[in-house]
Amino acid sequence: MYWCRSKIIYRAVLIVSILFAGAFSACKPEIKETGDTLKYVDLKAYFKDNSAHLTVLNKSVYKTVTHNGVTESKKVHIDNWERELSLFSESDINKPAWKDSYFIQNTVNTLVYKAKYPELQTREIIINKENNKIKRITIVNHTQNILYETREKLIYIPDSMYNIEKMQHVKLLGSNKYDITGILNQ
């Protein structure tokens, strides 16, 4: 009897939790749903399209991973390019609250976004173009609080390679340094 009642209560709590989670996630519309035009390059859409393109190409990748000086390299097949390039797409700066948070420098072949405020995680995005086509994206991220500090430098060259340099320092646990490079095989 007690077991049956606790099971019913557990299911009720689970259902209410799911409903609250759904309600709260619906309260955060994407900027596209608000009708606003995007002020900055849409990295999220760019890397979603590139992930689909790389999936269709189905090329193998020569991937090198270095963790604290220990290196391993091998030829791999990436099954989920969206996940592989998620650090790049997560660096998207098109959130409504950040609409005026970046300086913009635009020349014929280079577009640069620099954070105005030190608390912004994405510090800088540099997009190199040629004939209005993206040739290279460099992203610098930095997060720091009383528990940890993370620095990332991300480089993406379409249809060629990507590089992720990441340094993490967690108080009481120490530092870790990662360097991941993927070179698309021809």
Image: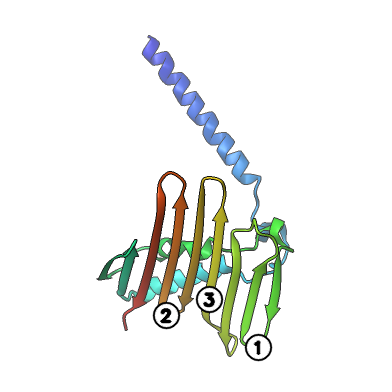
Residue in the image at 65% along x and 88% along y: 108
> Which residue is labeled 2 in the image?
159
In this view of the protein, which residue sits in the foreground, 182 or 15? 182
Q: Please give the residue where the numbered disc 1 appears in the rendered image.
A: 108
The amino acid marked with disc number 3 is Ile
- Residue pictured at 68% horizontal, 81% vertical: 106
> What amino acid is found at the position of numbered circle 2 in the picture?
Asp
Give the crowd class for mark 1: few <14, some 14-19, many >=20 residues within 10 Å.
few
Classify residue 69 as left or right of residue 139. Answer: left
Q: Give the mark, 2 or 3, whose residue is nearer the N terminus.
A: 3
- The location of residue 186, given as percent across then percent down, is 32, 84
Q: Do the residues labelled 3 and 1 touch (CB within 8 Å)?
A: no
Q: Which mark is first along the chain, 2 or 1?
A: 1
The label on residue 137 is 3
| C-alpha span from label 2 to label 3 | 12 Å
Of the pair 6 and 97, the residue shown nearer to us? 97
- 83 or 2, which is in the foreground? 83
> Which is closer to the viewer, label 2 or label 3?
3
Indicate the secondary structure of the residue bearing disc 2. loop
Q: Where is residue 157 in the image (x, y as percent from the top left)?
A: 46, 79
C-alpha span from label 3 to label 1: 15 Å
